[in-house]
Image: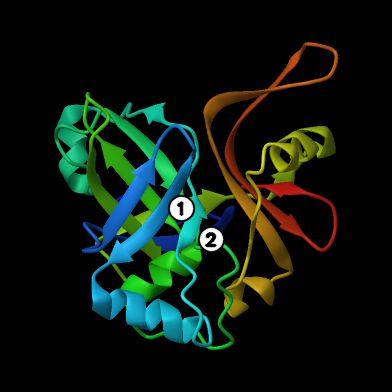
Amino acid sequence: MSSRQDESDDVAMQLSVIPGVEVELDVSIERNAYSLIGPETVLAGVRKMGDGQLLSQGTISPLAAVTVPDELKGTLAIPPNAAFFAFMYPIKDLAPTVLPSDQTLCTFLLGGFLYFDADKQLLCFNGLALSPSSVVITLKGPFDGDLAFTDRVADAGRLANVTISQLREGGFRKFAWIHPSETFAQDDGSELRLGSNVRLPAAPASIA
């Protein structure tokens, strides 16, 4: 993640970070789940994207420690007292045919980051968006993926559908956020270790 454009030949994708999205969330760390509960203006917009059906449930990744140094948190829109974070996946089954112009609504199609204090109390939601922002997350790659790892990510229920048309046109269908050095157990008791954003195209797995 950077606070400015990071120019590199192997940049696969850049997404903007919208700091402090003003929404009301009911988050369960134990269940790795969340519900959007307000405000009503956002609920109305989500209901419109759902063709009249209010789809408001989603999943979050397991919590991980914030390792960004305190002196850099401000430049990355991370609260100064943030101790943990989780990736918040898009609302399940929400797949509008037209991308909304409202960037708050877009965050529920792209996901974002939930930050928690040392007591694991929610501090804020920084959403991902396609519009320009002072904070940018840069994904590099793609790199050849390990299909065994992808299978484990899928088994853990961590793969989400890609619904943004601009991304689907690039061939991507599913994605997952994997924490740095996160491990997934294999049947033989060994562990697969990787930290990245895993995106599944129509062809074999790729990792960025």
Residue drawn at point x = 17 percent, y = 41 percent: 79
The answer to whether 62 is drawn above or below residue 38 in the figure is above
Give the mark count. 2
Residue 30 is left or right of residue 181, and the answer is left
Determine the secondary structure under disc 2. strand
Q: Examine the image and state in which quarter residue 103 appears.
A: bottom left
For this rendering, which residue is in front, 177 or 155? 155
Determine the secondary structure under disc 1. strand
x, y percent for residue 119 = 22, 25
User: Could you give the CA–CA distance between mark 1 and mark 2, rounded to whole angstroms?
Assistant: 6 Å
For this rendering, which residue is in front, 99 or 138? 99
Q: Examine the image and state in which quarter residue 100 appears.
A: bottom left
Residue drawn at point x = 70 percent, y = 64 percent: 172
Residue drawn at point x = 20 percent, y = 36 percent: 72
Where is mark 1, residue-wise? 138
Residue 64 is left or right of residue 143, and the answer is left
Residue drawn at point x = 59 percent, y = 76 percent: 95
The answer to whether 203 is drawn above or below residue 33 in the figure is below
Where is mark 2, residue-wise? 13
x, y percent for residue 121 = 23, 35
Mark 1 Cα within 10 Å, few/some/many (few <14, many 20+)?
many
